[in-house]
Amino acid sequence: MPVTETKTDAPRKFVPYEPAKGEEYMNEQQLEHFREILLVWKQELMEEVDRTVRHLQEDASNNYADPADRATQEEGFSLELRTRDRERKLLKKIHETIDKINEDDYGFCEACGVEIGIRRLEARPTATLCVDCKTLAELKEKQLGG
């Protein structure tokens, strides 16, 4: 059974945004840059969903006589479905993020209100926390055990 590639990382096929000196943070050009990144990412995820559906339909028609082969097939299905479930949740975050862009409420930390930063958003366009608040949240989570 082929290994399925996951698309949970933001697309890497974009030109990094280079703000002009003194350019206002999250102006229309920057918002459009991130909207485009998110739309490309969404499209990649949707194409992956289509490939998975086709793959599962094709593989489901194989009736393996050997129980070990059937178990391997079922484990592969299970892994693919878990991956697609993570991607489904990510699609929801992408939709929410596009909504924030459309509402001019994108790029600022939900906890403290500071700029998240262009480079961080290019690495993770759905980020809602600045690096400091995200680090603090992860430390708290670790201390509380999950």
Image (cartoon, rainbow, N blue to C red):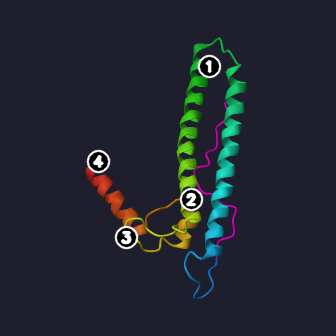
Q: Secondary structure at mark 2?
A: helix
Please tell me which of labels 4 and 3 falls first in the chain: 3
Quadrant where the N terminus sits is top right
Q: CA distance from mark 3 to mark 2?
A: 20 Å
- Residue 69, which numbered label? 1
- Numbered disc in front, either 1 or 3: 3
Residue bearing mark 2? 99
Considering only vertical position in the picture, is 129 above or below 142?
below
Q: Residue at x 58, y 53 (%)?
A: 95
Give coordinates of residue 79: x percent, y percent. 55, 33
> Can residue 43 be found in the magenta stretch?
no
Q: Amino acid at mark 4?
A: Gly
Q: CA distance from mark 2 to mark 4?
A: 32 Å
Indicate the quadrant where residue 77 lies.
top right
Please tell me which of labels 3 and 2 falls first in the chain: 2
- Numbered disc in front, either 1 or 2: 2
Considering only vertical position in the picture, is 7 above or below 110?
above
First to last magenta residue range: 1-17
- Numbered disc in front, either 4 or 1: 4
Residue bearing mark 3? 112
Q: Amino acid at mark 1?
A: Asp
Dot 2 crowding, Cα within 10 Å, few <14, some 14–19, many 20+: some
- Numbered disc in front, either 2 or 4: 2
Give coordinates of residue 143: x percent, y percent. 27, 54
Residue bearing mark 4? 145
Horizontal relation, residue 112 to residue 21: left or right: left
Q: Amino acid at mark 2?
A: Asp
Please tell me which of labels 4 and 1 falls first in the chain: 1
Indicate the quadrant where residue 38 lies.
bottom right
Q: Amino acid at mark 3?
A: Cys
